[in-house]
Amino acid sequence: MKFSYSLLKEFAPQLPPKKRLVEELNLKAFEAEVLEGDALDISLPANRYADAASHWGIAKEASAIFDIKISLPAGFGRAVNVPSGNNLLLIKVEDPGLCSRYDAVLLSLEKKSASPAWLKKRLETCGLRPISLIVDIMNYAMLETGQPLHAFDYDKIAGEGKSKKIIVRRAKAGERMEALDGKTYQLSAGDLVIADKDGILAIAGIKGGRKAEIDSSTRKIVIESANFLAPSVYSTSRRLNLVTDASARFSRDLSPELAEYCANRAAYLVKELAGGKVIDSLDYYPRAAKSEIIGFSAEKAASVLGVSIRKNEAAAILKKLGMAILTSKNKRFDFLVQTPVLRRDLQTMEDLIEEVGRIYGYDNIPSRPPHVSLKPAETDDILVAKRRTRDFLRNLGFSEIYSYSFFGRSSSDWIWSSSPKEKTLLEIQNPIASDKKYLRGELTSYMLAALQDNSRHFDELRIFEVGKVFSAAGERFHLTIGFGSKDKAASPALKGVVNQLLLSFGITEIFFRPSGSESTLIEIDHNVVGRIGVVDGRDRRAVAELDLEEIKNASSEEFEYRALPKYPSISRDLSLEFDSAVPVGDVLEEINRAKAEHLWDVDVTDYYDQRRFTLRLVFQAWDKTLRDEEAEREAASIINQLKRKFSFAIR
Amino acid sequence: MNPETLKQEAYIDIEACNNLKELEAVRIKYVGRKSELALMLRGMKDLPLEERKIAAPELQQARREIEEMMASKEKELASSKEEAMVDLTRPGARHAFGHLHPLTLMEKEVVDIFTSMNFSVIDGPEVETEHYNFDVLNIPANHPAREMWDTFWLKGGKDSGSRKLLRTHTSPMQVRYMETHTPPLQIIVPGRVFRYEATDASHEINFYQVEGLMVGRDIGLANFKYVIEEFLKKMFGPKTEFRFRPSYFPFTEPSLEVDVRLVGGKGKQSESLRAIAESRKSEWLEVMGAGMVNPKVFEAAGYNPEEWQGFAFGVGLERLAMLKYKIPDIRLFYSDDLRIINQF
């Protein structure tokens, strides 16, 4: 929010120079910055609009920080000796719950004039566009006090004398209003509006309408200084997608007490600058807002802030912030604090402790190590699994990417589950782009893109990602691994990585079950935990996706020592040439079926193509030295077993 | 000459060889076509059968052994020849070496510092309910405070409170964790969060935060300052200066923001910080939001606020990584370009 330094100085003549002001505001109140010329930028938190989103409010903060006096401009304050009860207008608030105050001042205008240069300049400094004298005065008074105002052309409000009536009511569904900017807004039932008996004059607290607009022929005006319920203004403004200076302020819960200060100040400026004369005034204010009384304990403050501030010092700080200190009968408190009625944010003792703390200065609070009883720290298992996976893959030469959690298609191709819930993607109600309408159900799609994107720059690609995937069944951490090569078979390389990764988690019951021609399911203990597959048909690019939670659940740290073999093993290489293509997996399965007693390990040592490959059989006995004849006999039985199923020659 | 003597002489000659050429001469001398051994073997056919049966295997055995000695000498000479050609100026082989994502590195660093201070590390859901993301954190519906967190909502869910959304911060884990654990406690929660906003060099629709929460009987702001100063010194170097400013978050009271500044130090880190500070025309860089847990949050979690107090903080990982690694644009973290990733 932009502020004029010279106007602040009118409220606090002893105000320090801009730079110092901004420094101290930053440290003790609000984020602030010096802009060009007379302007300052000060960020107001949502809970301080009620008292501080004005030059008066910032001056009050400065007065507490620098211990300087406030000087109020003429006409500022409560109404005195103002004509009222002249029956020139009636106000009817139909829903007091949504409008706690409606203050109206009627003025007749004597002379027509333009806004003086100083007024225009101040408005511009604060980011407002000068429009016409009356409108400019309304805006200026808002900048001074923080209360939004609106001025109606009295003569354009329907009715005469006693029957001229401003009605604060809820809109009917579909009711329309043409606004000052020429746009027409369609309202919903429940939106709060200001109307006369014929139609809508303004959307309450948001925007004025054409109907009672001030123009060059306006002779009499009604200044509206009202208070509307924050959530009501906020939801209407959100729905209409119409945020104005007024709506931003009302949405942040102003005090109804503010209305009177501002109405009077605006009326004063109209008198001074436009030769106006107050002809009537009305104040609908059935229930006056009250300030809070809150107990304060210096001991609690010391505990929360971690520094002892004497109760007198705390009281002095609170007084500087406009609070009254009262004696407490309750021994729990050192004193009671009566808050300024505009400070809607002060509700609890913690709120007061914050006030004391910030003005005392957070930098003046020492740093002190906490005293706690020692309890071992823990790390969630899934986070440990994530870290182990990342370190393992990094050490195998894989680089990590992070992709977006969003997804363009409503289904994921890569997920192995057949459960409809796990296949249903979650849809975003307000997507930011059409290719980000869903939450990702898999990581592989992004991995495929990464393999493609990087293929121009690298001969061999090793990439992985760990991240959450989502479905109607919930969210889980997945892992995707991609391998790409210019000339090497990708799937065996990747399968080896997956196998080693699982082994590193102490998982041994690993099975790769073919599923379709280009992918294989990864099973642990007969439970599918992932999928691995070739993506380009030539086996130069392969990807795998695994459920990291399943890996975490299956992981076992129960390693156990096993004595080394005392006797030598015997290896036999079998170079096979099949008559037609045969999957190695089928051959290995058949070898298992032979149940050779001493067969200890089988590996593919040479793979020429699907018809020609070499297997190494390792035979090992644990209780004796195996004789050549025994190994030969077992190898022969394996060959016989293979011959039952396949037709091949041994080379 | 008997085979045994022949073997001994051959052994002496072979060992005396200094190069392959000499060895070749020895070969011709002992096992060449015209060597004594060859002649003796050829002469076997003239011997009577009985004598031949004994002498021939001996000679053949001698020949095999001499050939073996020569083979091993040849190997020795050949390898010493290779050694002479070793070129240590050749560049090292390029072994495949992987790279962790800079955000992973950053998260590791943050997590390791806090675990060294006995904080537990907790994971939480990225799809949250309105209840945990907003309501229990004292951010009511229809309140403009919610505008601090532009939200992605999920389709479905109608009832207020149970409506699903993508968590806009890691703070929902404060209440989730407290609901199932008893104080005193100290945790950090690293994780991905989401904001519905236009992306630019410093805004992304998904990014990372680390939430911190410490609760005890009398954990105060002075303790917060200590813990965070230790953290920032370990992160940015011992000469880091800090600034604690008032701020506003509905779920903390008082609320603060923490800025850092580096002076004096000539370390690499301070240089990078200084460069960024200069480019932003401010010597102070904001690094986290924090505060004392609002009693309303304790109430929502079922704690008695009269009994417990503590601090909470949230730090953006991308922001730390951008400062530390001089990365100018947050969107680079979510590009899949390995030429970037492989720099870390």
Image (cartoon, rainbow, N blue to C red):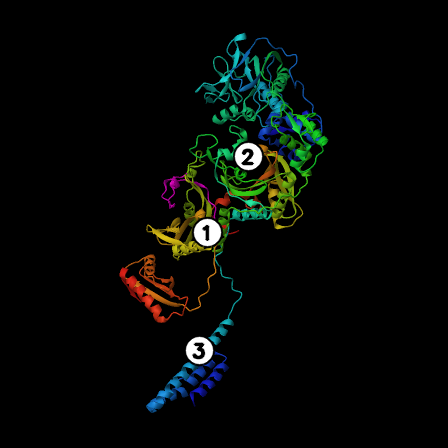
Q: Give the answer, above or below, for where B109 lies relative to A121.
A: below
Whether labels 2 and 3 belong to a single chain: the reply is yes
What element does badge 3 sit on?
helix
Query: How far, Cα to Cα, is label 2 from label 3?
Result: 85 Å
Q: Are marks 2 and 3 in contact (CB under 8 Å)?
A: no
**Residue A555, label in figure:** 1
**For discs 3 and 1, the disc positioned in front in the rendered view:** 1
Query: Picture coordinates of residue B331 (x, y %)?
Result: 50, 43
Whether labels 3 and 1 belong to a single chain: the reply is no
Instruction: Identify the magenta region.
Output: A400-425
Query: How far, Cα to Cα, is label 3 from label 1?
Result: 52 Å
Q: Which residue is mark 2?
A: B302
Q: Amino acid at mark 1?
A: Ser
Q: Which residue is mark 3?
A: B71
What element does badge 1 sit on?
loop
**For discs 2 and 3, the disc positioned in front in the rendered view:** 2
User: Which chain is indicated by disc 1?
Assistant: A
Query: How far, Cα to Cα, is label 1 from label 2?
Result: 35 Å
Q: Main secondary structure of the magenta part?
A: loop
